[in-house]
Image (tube, rainbow, N blue to C red):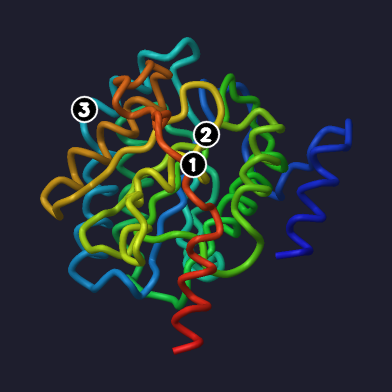
Amino acid sequence: MLASLALLTTLLAGPATPPSPAGSASGDVDVELVLAVDTSRSMDYEEMRVQREGYVSALQHADFINAVRGGLIGRIAITYFEWAGEVDPASVLDWQIIETQADARAFAEKLAARPIATQRRTSISAAIAYGTQTILTNSYRGMRQVIDVSGDGPNNIGLPVEGVRDKAIEAGIIINGLAIMLRPTGAAAFGSSAGLDDYYGDCVIGGPGAFVMPVHKPEDFDTAIRRKLVLEVSGLAPDATLHRIAARPKTDCMMGELQWQQFQDR
């Protein structure tokens, strides 16, 4: 993680053109979209399956395709990876242009073919750092850059999430969140009045128009993911209720680390 942050800092400071990955395409797109999906063991297999099917379905839905076609350029660049205590390199789906329904179907089929696997711990900071790095080093020129983070708990390993989030925002990246609240694994689980959506709002998301969308029931995954992707691709302003700016004390962004330490001390 320290190496990742050092590289991230270098990339943000350097004026040079980011290197192009071997074999990648390039060009102008409406948005460079990173899908960073939580696969920590706090989610059971059924929840993971429903989450995966939600992404596969949303990527092929007419609303998503129409949002892509409705952009100024009419195409986006997209990549996907899974994370828990760290990013799983085997889960990375390389950057791909989506311009047509066939493009979207091809990307969704790659995702559907991936085995479902879980990992230990939760490092949102690792997910944001990796997402930022892959945006800064790809060969696309997006009018917007978005990291879409889904998760069911607060950061509890690696670098503190706030600093890494702030570095990404400094680079002009927007970070949105999908707060998976099927179980009390978030902030409210250890005595705080805040919920995971509040934690995401205060500590994870950022940039112009950033929002967090909560999911409370498995059957809501499909609709929530589709709605989120459409908003991110179209650049439309989300409903005001999705902006996590409230008249309440700020959530402790180290609460996940504290929760883990308390667990270790018991």
Question: Measured from the top left, where is residue 138 in percent x and y?
Answer: 67, 40
Q: Are marks 2 and 1 in contact (CB under 8 Å)?
A: no
Q: Position of residue 153 (x, y in %)?
A: 39, 61
Which mark is in front, 2 or 3?
Answer: 2
Q: Which mark sits nearer the N-terminus, 2 or 1?
A: 2
How far across and down, in percent of the image, does residue 173 sit?
Answer: 61, 32
* Quadrant containing the C terminus in the rendered view: bottom left
The N terminus: image quadrant? bottom right
Label 1: few (<14), some (14–19) or many (≥20) C-alpha neighbours in 10 Å = some
Disc 1 to disc 3, C-alpha distance: 38 Å
User: Which residue is at 52% across, 69% downward?
Assistant: 258
Task: Report the residue that reaches farthest toward the bottom.
Answer: 266
> Would you identify the image quadrant in which residue 130 lies?
bottom right
Query: Which residue bears the numbered disc 3?
Result: 62
Report the front residue among 206 and 136: 206
The residue singled out by tag 1 in the image is 250
Q: Are marks 1 and 3 in contact (CB under 8 Å)?
A: no
Please give the residue where the numbered disc 2 appears in the rendered image: 146
Is 5 placed above or below 24 here? below
Q: For the residues carrying marks 1 and 3, which lies nearer the camera in this image?
A: 1
Query: Could you tell me residue 21's position as x and y percent?
Result: 71, 48
Say what amino acid the circle numbered 2 marks: Val
Q: Is residue 46 above or below residue 145?
A: below
Q: Secondary structure at mark 1?
A: loop
216 shown above or below 206: below
Which is nearer the eye, 265 or 216?
265
Disc 2 or 3, which lies upstream in sequence?
A: 3
Q: CA distance from mark 2 to mark 3?
A: 21 Å
